Image (tube, rainbow, N blue to C red):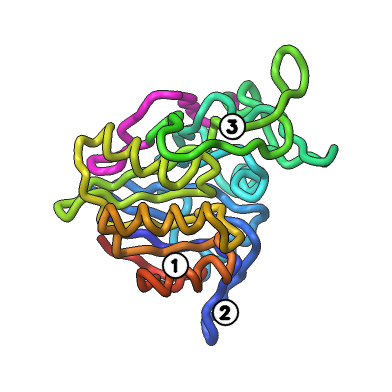
Amino acid sequence: MKLQVLIDRNTYIDQYLLGEPALSFYIEDAGKKILFDVGYSDAFIQNAKTLGIHLNEISAIVISHGHNDHTLGLQYLKDQYDLSNVEIITHPDAFNEKICDQEPIGAPYDLHTLSTICKLTATKTPLQVSENLLFLGEIPESVESRTAIGQQKESSGFVDDYVLDDSALVYKSPKGLFIITGCSHSGICNIIEYAKQICQDDRIHGIIGGFHLFQVDSKLKNTIQYFLDNQITELYPCHCSSFEVRAEIHKHIPIHEVATGMILKI
């Protein structure tokens, strides 16, 4: 697997790529070209062009969850590329209307509109995306509890949103599982536990993506201990992982820097 960061809030010096507080990864596995999330604007498209990545060749887009910093880029992608033969894989709730403090924080389309743009696969159950990549679907609580973030619209009206649509990809490698997250609203430890269960492999080779951890507190302490207990040594926290959190993790497990343009080969 080859993964290249198309958008992150961090950028490398002397590499003139765009950054924004969002996330998008370009992934190649066994001849298949995949986007994982699409950022907040068209910045990931501009970066792809600069990096020589041809987005007209992608066959699938995996959306980790429905927040706008992972989905708004779809409208710019649609304007520049024909997505009619591209499969978009996501949880059924990802394109529900979402708000926080009365402000919209959701995707640019609903599921019906999206289904007219692309080949839509909305699933709560795990789904094979490529030869070695698996979409986890809905993540159950096992190690940690979910926290509501804003509200989402259901048939009865707006209800607290526990972001059940938050999912992840798992790459099955000879060294174990490599997990690719968007924001980990489901709980990074819950994601890992479910990946181990679904893939029937307790070896976690590494993780890249947002951990949704911002404070040095008991939750972070428990998360670090979980990483240590599971002997996870390849950590690439980015996006919604604060500097304080990354610094604290680094005291126990050396972490890797992530920035727009970074290439990871597994």
The picture quadrant where one finds residue 191 is top left
Mark 2 vs mark 1, foreground winner is 1
- Density class for disc 3 (Cα within 10 Å; few <14, some 14-19, many ≥20) is many
Q: If you read the primary sequence from the N terminus, does the residue marked by circle 2 or circle 1 appear first?
A: 2
Quarter of the picture containing the C terminus is bottom left
The type of residue carrying mark 1 is Ile
Q: Which residue in the structure is indicated by mark 2? A: 16
Q: Residue at x 66, y 27 (%)?
A: 96
**Amino acid type, callout 3:** Ala
Q: Which residues are magenta?
A: 116-135
Q: Is residue 104 above or below residue 26?
A: above
Q: Earlier in the sequence, mark 1 or mark 3?
A: 3
Q: Residue furthest top?
A: 156
**Residue where numbered disc 1 is placed:** 249
Q: Nearer the viewer, residue 53 or 65?
A: 65
Please tell me which residue is depicted at 63% across the width and 30% down the height of the picture. Answer: 95
